[in-house]
Amino acid sequence: MATATGTIELASSAPDVWRAATDFGRFPEWLAIHRKWVGDHPVGPVVGESCQQEVVLLGPPATITWTVATVVPDTALELTGRGPSGIRARFSCSVASVGAITELTLELEFTGGPLTGPIDVMIEKSAKSQLEASLEKFRAMVS
């Protein structure tokens, strides 16, 4: 299993961070693994909605079919997905007010299929790097 988690602190309000983080149309602006949507993307985070996203972690792009699994308004979003060769994926974001700041936490997880041994380690390293880049792009976007 390849996992990556990261948190940033932002001066923006929690509702503003939530709206930006869960606006699928803005993923190309900040989500580093995002290459393009395949067809339409969900207008908003609604449980049960599905979409296809082309992502790049290592090598050629792969298409993941995502389903919105969990939405806790203004707080948490979780997408679960299936990719090629039996790969399963999970993407989550959570937003929390901590005093005058807002924390945004992102998690990526990839399991199954060929993700064992050295490939798993390489995917995890790439996921962590891209997650860090995503958080910095997000910070710039909402500043």
Image (tube, helix red, strand yellow):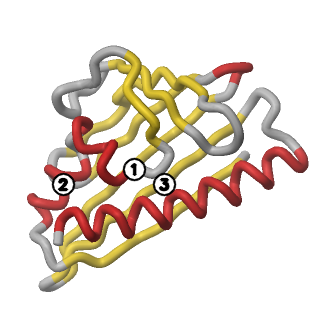
The residue at 48%/21% (across/down) is: 65
Quarter-of-image position of residue 127: bottom right
The part of the image, by quadrant, that contains residue 105 is: bottom left
Q: Position of residue 93 (x, y in %)?
A: 36, 52
Q: CA distance from mark 3 to mark 1?
A: 12 Å
Mark toward the viewer: 3 or 1: 1
Instruction: Name the residue rendered at 64%, 40% in the picture.
Output: 110
Task: Decide: few, some or many residues near mark 1? Use Cα within 10 Å; few <14, some 14-19, many ≥20.
Answer: many
The residue at the point 18 percent across, 54 percent down is 18
Work out how far the residue at label 2 is from the one at label 3, CA to CA, in angstroms.
Answer: 15 Å
Q: Quadrant of the C terminus?
A: bottom left
The dot on residue 107 is: 3
- Residue at the extreme bottom: 99
Q: Is residue 87 left or right of residue 131?
A: right
Tell whether label 3 touches label 2 (CB within 8 Å): no
In the rendered view, does 18 fall on the left or right side of 129? Answer: left
Closer-to-camera residue (96/139): 139
The kind of secondary structure element at disc 3 is strand
Left or right: 93, with 47 as reference point: right
Question: Residue 132's mark?
Answer: none
**Residue 98 vertical placement versus 111 (above, below):** below
Q: Secondary structure at mark 1?
A: loop
Q: Amino acid at mark 2?
A: Trp
In the depicted view, which residue is nearer to us: 125 or 116? 125
Q: Is residue 101 above or below residue 90?
A: below
Specify the amino acid type for callout 3. Glu
**Mark before the other along the chain sequence, 1 or 2:** 2
- For label 1, the residue is 31
User: In the image, residue 47 lies at what x, y percent?
Assistant: 27, 26
Label 2: which secondary element: helix
Vertical comparison of 38 with 26: above or below? above
